[in-house]
Amino acid sequence: MTLLILIIVLALIFDYINGFHDAANAIATVVATKVLTPFQAVVWAAFFNFLAYWVFGFGVADTVAKTAHTMEINLVVILAGVIAAICWNLLTWWLGIPSSSSHTLIGGFAGAAVAHAIAVHGFSGYVGEDGATHYWYEIVSWYKAGKDGGMPSGVIIIIAFIVLAPLIGAIASYLISIWLLNASRKSIGPKIFTVALMIATIVFVWCLMKPYSEIDKPRFDSHFWSVAFDSHNIKWFLVAFIVLTVSAFCLIFSSLNLHQADAALKKMQLLSSAAFSLGHGGNDSQKVMGIIAAAVAVYINTNPGVHMDAWLDVVLPNDDLGIKGVMPSWIPLACYSAIAAGTLSGGWKIVKTMGSKITKVSSFEGVAAETAGALTLYFTEHLKIPVSTTHTITGSIIGVGLTKRVSAVRWGVTVSLIWAWILTIPISALLAGLVYFILSVFI
């Protein structure tokens, strides 16, 4: 039990470090455009990091918890993974490199699990409880097909989104920038497009709404408020609110003078940065929830018959067996509080890289980048894919830079960032494997 408590404490410390390491993701463009002071920006971001507690479910947490097969590992594996993730995060923060805290954690978890499998079984095959022959690399959940044709999961999918998340963010921010640029012209075409997009958004979100009869645990006695504040529905309400707000601005953009347009864009940056902070809190806090859930599951597996107190009564969901997940409320509350506190601590070296070194960012570009980043995070969270908020916002900033000209993006800085992204998972995995072998000597 002592080791389990230590893992939970270290996981929350990692969540705190994640907050100040990734603070730049949400505040870099707001600070760069001087919409808010650095202190105001971190308070703003931290508030919406914490507010995400009431918005998002636990789909990403479930994906992270199942990075490795919990029936085949021990607590030392998870401890080694968390320690390696903390070390890599602190190193990249010190160097001012906006690497992915998400991929650090997943790489550490997977690397320690592989080291454990090699230590226990070696490189040769072994017969598992199911009577089949297994190998050391199978301890990690590399790929699992989606249920009923849904989105597949596994480490390979997470690795794929190292490329896809920034690419989606870049494409989305590029298209939003083009949309805003055309909306500034005094012609009817962009306004027709904007009205059509508003109608399509309302229809799309309406079709995705979950009715009261399908809500497992209504939050209120009122049907209306239960539907409005269901974690599934509120996320799509936010998507609609973001798109409709930008659309409303586009309808009046051409009638504003330069000063009025800049003032309106700066106000919209508050909305876009808040939306991105919500996505950041919801995405990154869930990864730590997943690690804590996995630690509890491993503890139960390695101590059969143990009685768990109600505050540690965690159950991982299993769609194949029809088992619904159970997560004590203190775990998400602690995770969201830790990441919000970390965001309040800032991360100014990375703010400089994100806010000015990639490309020069104005209020116009800030709105486009943060809106694109937020929408990308909401959709990937819906698909239960733990993506990197760092990669997403970096791709979005590159996307808005491309609308000016290709040379507006400082590709030397960008290539350095991409190398950091590529190396994060393998270095974290190797570091976690080394930490596992060291810890195994003493534990």
Image (spheres, rainbow, N blue to C red):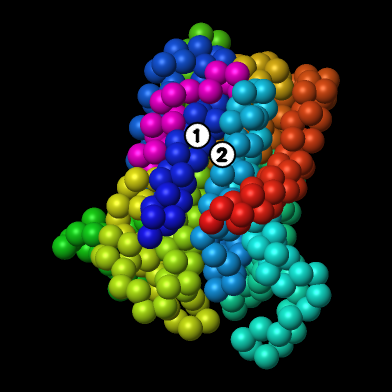
The image position of residue 366, as x and y in percent, is: 57, 24
Side of 9 where 399 appears, left or right? right
The earlier-in-sequence mark between 2 and 1 is 1
How far from the left and from the top, in percent, is residue 384?
54, 59
Q: Nearer the viewer, mark 2 or mark 1?
A: 2
Q: Is residue 220 visible?
A: yes
Q: Residue at x 64, y 37 (%)?
A: 88
Q: Residue furthest left?
A: 221
Which residue bears the numbered disc 2? 86
Whether the residues at callouts 2 and 1 have beta carbons within 8 Å, the answer is yes
Label 1 is placed on what type of residue?
Ile
Which quadrant is home to the N terminus? bottom left
Badge number at residue 17? 1
The image shows residue 232 at horizontal and vertical percentages of: 41, 58
In the image, 278 versus 110, the foreground residue is 110
Q: Is residue 234 magenta?
A: no
Q: Identify the residue at image location x=55%, y=30%.
A: 21
- Tell me where the magenta segment starts and ends, as one range: 336-351
Q: Is residue 123 above or below residue 82?
A: below
Position above or below: 16 against 118: above
Identify the amino acid type marked 2: Ile
Pinpoint residue 227: horizontal percent, then vertical percent: 30, 60
Residue 342 sits inside the magenta stretch: yes
Q: Is residue 252 visible?
A: no
Disc 1 residue crowd, few under 14, some 14–19, many 20+, Cα 10 Å: many
How far apart are the alpha carbons under marks 2 and 1? Answer: 7 Å
The secondary element bearing badge 2 is classed as helix
Sort mark 2 into few (<14), some (14-19) or many (20+) by Cα contacts within 10 Å.
many
Residue at image position (79%, 28%) is 416
